Image (cartoon, grey):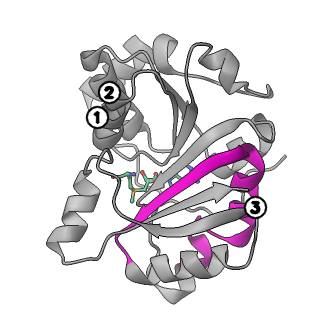
């Protein structure tokens, strides 16, 4: 299987701080997973968890670190391509003594297709995916019909796909993508009170962006 040719993320260079590198080195054995060619079984990763959630694109991890503390019985698999963010989240998780987190450095689309069985995840979280506001870049948005079909396949029946965005044109675009399929049903919901605010979200709010939360459930 090839990695997708269209990147949904910006290449930001690898400006990583010493603390982030040290944290990855110190905590990779505890938090890191290198799936290679295996099919990962969320139940094996978190045998005692009530549910297993995959979070796609946790950024610098400040919101994720707080969410995982609120749900200590839930297993979280954080997926990110940006190494400094991986280091940053490991710093928080180690400081907090979090036991319910694993981290995978990979393109989530590729990872889901290659390393997860269908009907294996209880929820997928996608908070503030890169909005790619220019029309010529819209094709780089992660929410596309093929991606929604992929997430739908990997969720269990009754599983939840939660999304938040601060870019209204992307929210409208997402709704049009979900309207083209019938495996996931739902729409706009109130902001869940447990979804801690990331710096990315607060920056959007300062710029008067409207934040939209979606919840779709697999039927
Ligand atoms: C705009 S940031 C938001 C980060 C975070 N969720 C927040 O609220 O602050 C989007 C993140 O998604 C990551 N990302 C984009 N496409 C991805 C993909 N295909 N797989 C994994 N991570 C991805 C980027 O590296 C970036 O860190």
Q: Is residue 124 magenta?
A: no
- Where residue 122 sits, quadrant-wise, is top right
**How would you rate the neighbour count of disc 1 (Cα within 10 Å): few for under 14, some for 14-19, many for 20 or more?**
some
- Where residue 42 sits, quadrant-wise, is top right
- Which residue in the protein does label 2 denote? 69
Left or right of 96 in this view: 167: right
Q: Is residue 159 magenta?
A: yes
**Mark 3 → mark 2, Cα distance in angstroms:** 30 Å
Magenta-tinted stretch: 138-167
Q: Nearer the viewer, residue 68 or 27?
A: 68
Left or right of 188 in this view: 177: right
Mark 1 in CB contact with mark 3 (< 8 angstroms): no
Can you name the residue that lies furthest to the bottom here? 135
- Measured along the vertical axis of the image, is residue 5 above or below residue 115? below
Return the disc, 3 or 2, that comes first in the chain's sequence: 2
- Which residue in the protein does label 1 denote? 66
**Mark 1 → mark 3, Cα distance in angstroms:** 29 Å
Q: Secondary structure at mark 2?
A: helix
- Measured along the vertical axis of the image, is residue 66 above or below residue 200? above
The label shown at residue 149 is: 3
Q: Secondary structure at mark 1?
A: helix
**Mark 2 → mark 1, Cα distance in angstroms:** 5 Å
Return the disc, 1 or 3, that comes first in the chain's sequence: 1
**How would you rate the neighbour count of disc 3 (Cα within 10 Å): few for under 14, some for 14-19, many for 20 or more?**
some
**Tag count:** 3
The residue drawn where x is 39% and y is 29% is 71
């Amino acid at each position: 299987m090839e990695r997708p040719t269209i990147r949904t993320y910006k290449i930001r260079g690898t400006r990583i701080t010493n603390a982030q590198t040290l944290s990855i080195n110190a905590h990779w054995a505890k938090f890191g997973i290198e799936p290679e060619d295996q099919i990962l079984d969320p139940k094996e990763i978190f045998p005692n968890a009530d549910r297993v959630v995959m979070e796609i694109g946790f950024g610098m991890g400040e919101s994720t670190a707080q969410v995982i503390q609120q749900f200590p019985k839930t297993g979280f698999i954080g997926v990110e391509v940006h190494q400094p963010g991986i280091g940053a989240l490991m710093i928080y998780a180690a400081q907090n003594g979090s036991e319910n987190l694993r981290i995978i450095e990979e393109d989530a689309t590729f990872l889901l297709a290659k390393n997860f069985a269908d009907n294996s995840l209880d929820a997928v979280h996608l908070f503030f995916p890169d909005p790619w506001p220019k029309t010529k870049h819209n094709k780089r948005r992660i929410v596309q019909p093929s991606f929604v079909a992929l997430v739908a396949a990997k969720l269990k029946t009754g599983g939840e796909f939660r999304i938040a965005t601060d870019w209204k044109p992307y929210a409208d675009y997402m709704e049009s993508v979900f309207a083209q399929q019938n495996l996931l049903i739902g729409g706009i919901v109130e902001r869940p009170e447990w979804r801690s605010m990331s710096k990315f979200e607060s920056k959007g709010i300062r710029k008067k962006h409207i934040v939209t939360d979606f919840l779709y459930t697999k039927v």
